[in-house]
Amino acid sequence: MSDFEIRTLRTDEHRAASDLFRDTVHVRPATDAEWARSGLTYQPGGAIGAFDPELIGTARFFDAELTVPGGARVPMAGVTGVGVRADRTRRGVLRALMAAQLEEFAARGVVCANLLASEAGIYGRFGYGLATRIRTYTVDRARARLRPDAPVGGEIELLDADRAWERLPGVYDRIGRRPGTMSRPEVLWRLYEAQCRRREQPMKAVVHHGPDGLDGFATYFVEGMQAHPWTKSLEVPDLFAATPAAFAGLWRFLLGVDLVDRVVAEERPLDEPIELLLDDHRRLLENRIGDEHWIRLVDVPKALGAREYGPGEPVVVEVVDPQLPANNGTYRISPDGAERVDAPAALRLDVTTLGMLYLGFWRPSALAGVGRIEVRDPAAAVAADVLFGTRTVPWSGSHF
Ligand SMILES: CC(C)(COP(=O)(O)OP(=O)(O)OC[C@H]1O[C@@H](n2cnc3c(N)ncnc32)[C@H](O)[C@@H]1OP(=O)(O)O)[C@@H](O)C(=O)NCCC(=O)NCCS
């Protein structure tokens, strides 16, 4: 174990932290021109570093809000840029960075912290549970047709990249409200802009005008494929639609773009009805499931109190949180809400597992079935499925 100190980085240290992080994920440092953009994605005061005395590890966060089941929004920290120098790994640096972050989140009133993990084995031990999953699918553009009875109406407007960065934040604020989605602060839009401008192909964007105003948008790139320069793939990193008509309208447009053979929609919600929109669902060529957000409930009483619950019998659960003991305790969950109680628990689980079921993605009985929840009353696991279940599959749609 080497000695190191953890502290908040000054703004003039952000670039060194970025270089270090990029090196840990095997990416070259940002050029001056790239840093002019990506430096703006660092929230002042949001990055920490480990020093021994050189900078050997870093992590950062930005403030946002998470939409929870029922539609309320809670203060959230988006954790990213986590890396430890290759010659200083496995000696507790990440553990110390995570502890420092959690302490800060608790002090500043953050209710939950979210991240996307490079590897599945890292963050569970710090209380992060996998809370949403995604699929990336490919549509055979040349042969795919929308069903003749697919919703129609609305207008598509094409934007170039400059106009897109001005207009998309406002459109997103109106429509990005499914459980699991989050507000996108300016630092996040800056991050997307920096990533898109690094790409060789220009980004395009479309917005959908519905009967009540703007109700959808998509961004896309058309990539040439090296072996077959005329076989083009249209990639869609971002698509939000507030209504079925906006969803159909955006897909009608994307499938109509010329000189494209396949459309790849990235990191989509699992319940998105693309198969049902096509007249032949086998025009969906590839369907890959992946992990999306991991959630760490920092303030369990506030988190449980903020979301809504399904109908049925109340359930008392005991939550165990070794890192933030203020969360330890028993909570009564009912259709009317959640409250701390002094009563025997029917289910016992750690804060990581609570993060997994908080947004409604995993069923408590499934988590109990694999040993993640200790069941003292079998009926309680079934009741918890209904209480924690959600009508739509939770999804963030924001990658950072
Ligand atoms: C992942 C990374 C940050 C870990 O840093 P580290 O300083 O080596 O981690 P620590 O020594 O504090 O390890 C803490 C615990 O996590 C475990 N751990 C660390 N990295 C792990 C990994 N990649 N997979 C599984 N477990 C891991 C350690 O074994 C240790 O376990 P313990 O519970 O027995 O104590 C570092 O290896 C790294 O920078 N990797 C490349 C970049 C990356 O993937 N960053 C994460 C982006 S989301």
Image (tube, grey):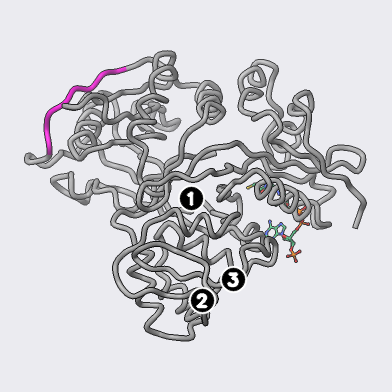
Q: Position of residue 30 (x, y in %)?
A: 68, 25
Picture quadrant of ligand 1: bottom right
Decide: is 289 above or below 49. Answer: below
Tell me the crowding category of disc 3: few under 14, some 14 to 19, or many 20 or more residues within 10 angstroms, Cα based: some
Q: Are marks 2 and 3 in contact (CB under 8 Å)?
A: no
Q: Quadrant of the C terminus?
A: top right
Which numbered tag is attached to residue 21?
A: none
Compare marks 2 and 3 and give the one earlier in the sequence.
Answer: 3
Of labels 1 and 3, earlier in sequence is 1
Splitting the image into 4 quarters, where does residue 377 fall?
bottom left
Image-based side of 29 in relation to 74, left or right: right
Residue type for callout 2 = Ile
Is 152 positioned to the left or the right of 252 in the image? left
Amino acid type, label 1: Glu
> Any magenta on residue 235?
no
Q: CA distance from mark 2 to mark 1?
A: 22 Å
Is label 3 in a helix, a strand or a loop? Answer: strand
**Numbered badge on residue 373:** 2
Image location (x, y in percent) of residue 150: 12, 40
Queried whether the magenta region covers residue 154, the answer comes back as: yes
Secondary structure of the residue carrying numbered label 1? loop
Residue in the picture at 68% in, 51% down? 102
Label 1, ligand 1: CB separation under 8 Å: no
According to the picture, the residue beneath numbered tag 1 turns out to be: 292
Q: Nearer the viewer, mark 1 or mark 3?
A: 3
Hey, which residue is sitting farthest front in the picture? Answer: 342
Q: Nearer the viewer, mark 2 or mark 1?
A: 2
Q: Is residue 366 above or below residue 10?
A: below
Residue pointed to by mark 3: 329
Q: Is residue 358 above or below residue 316?
A: above
**Residue type at tag 3:** Gly
Residue 176 found in image quarter? top left
